Image (tube, rainbow, N blue to C red):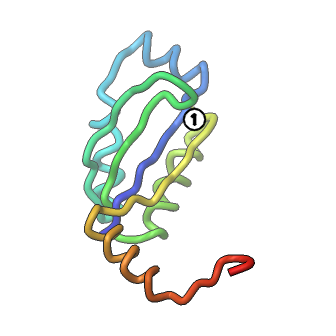
Amino acid sequence: MAYYMVQAAYTAEAIAAMVKKPEDRAAAIRPVVEKLGGKLEGIWFCFGEYDVVGISELPDNVSAAAFAFAVSQGGKVKALRTTPLMTGDEAVKAMKKAAGAGYRPPGG
């Protein structure tokens, strides 16, 4: 399974609804991730361009896209970004593989 970071910016309407009736969004999101064969590591509310960040482990890119589509179609998110993540071990393997790839930079 692979890790994915999902960042979302809520609409003003969604924020107003959460202020009026606060709820644990992780409790709402967890079953969706699990239904897609994954595991929700956690969600964090944040300042800046996005209002919430979630980390999930999902089987593949298709499952990650399905999650993004499911969230987007609800109409309460104005921006959504999904970023595939690598573990440190995966990054080291990628670096070793890159070393043998034979890439020649321009002018090199």
Q: How many marks?
A: 1
Question: Badge 1 local density, few (<14 within 10 Å), some, or many (20+)?
Answer: some
72, above or below 21, in the image: below
Locate residue 56, reporting x and y percent. Answer: 33, 53
Considering the numbered disc 1 on the image, is that residue within a helix, a strand or a loop?
strand
Direction front: furthest residue: 108
| Rendered-image quadrant of the C terminus | bottom right
Q: Please name the residue shown 34% across and 48% down the image.
A: 55
Q: Please name the residue shown 43% across and 10% down the image.
A: 20
Q: Please name the residue shown 53% across and 24% down the image.
A: 48
Locate residue 14, reporting x and y percent. Answer: 53, 23
Q: In the figure, residue 19 lies in which quadrant?
A: top left
Direction top: furthest residue: 20
70, above or below 38, in the image: above
Quick one: 64 or 32, which is closer to the camera?
64
Q: Is residue 73 left or right of residue 24?
A: right
Locate residue 66, reporting x and y percent. Answer: 49, 61
77, above or below 35, in the image: above
Q: Is residue 103 left or right of residue 106?
A: left
Q: Please name the residue shown 57% across and 43% down the image.
A: 80
Quick one: 32 or 89, which is closer to the camera?
89
Locate residue 52, reporting x and y percent. Answer: 44, 32
Mark 1 = which residue?
77
6, above or below 86, in the image: above
Q: Amino acid at mark 1?
A: Val
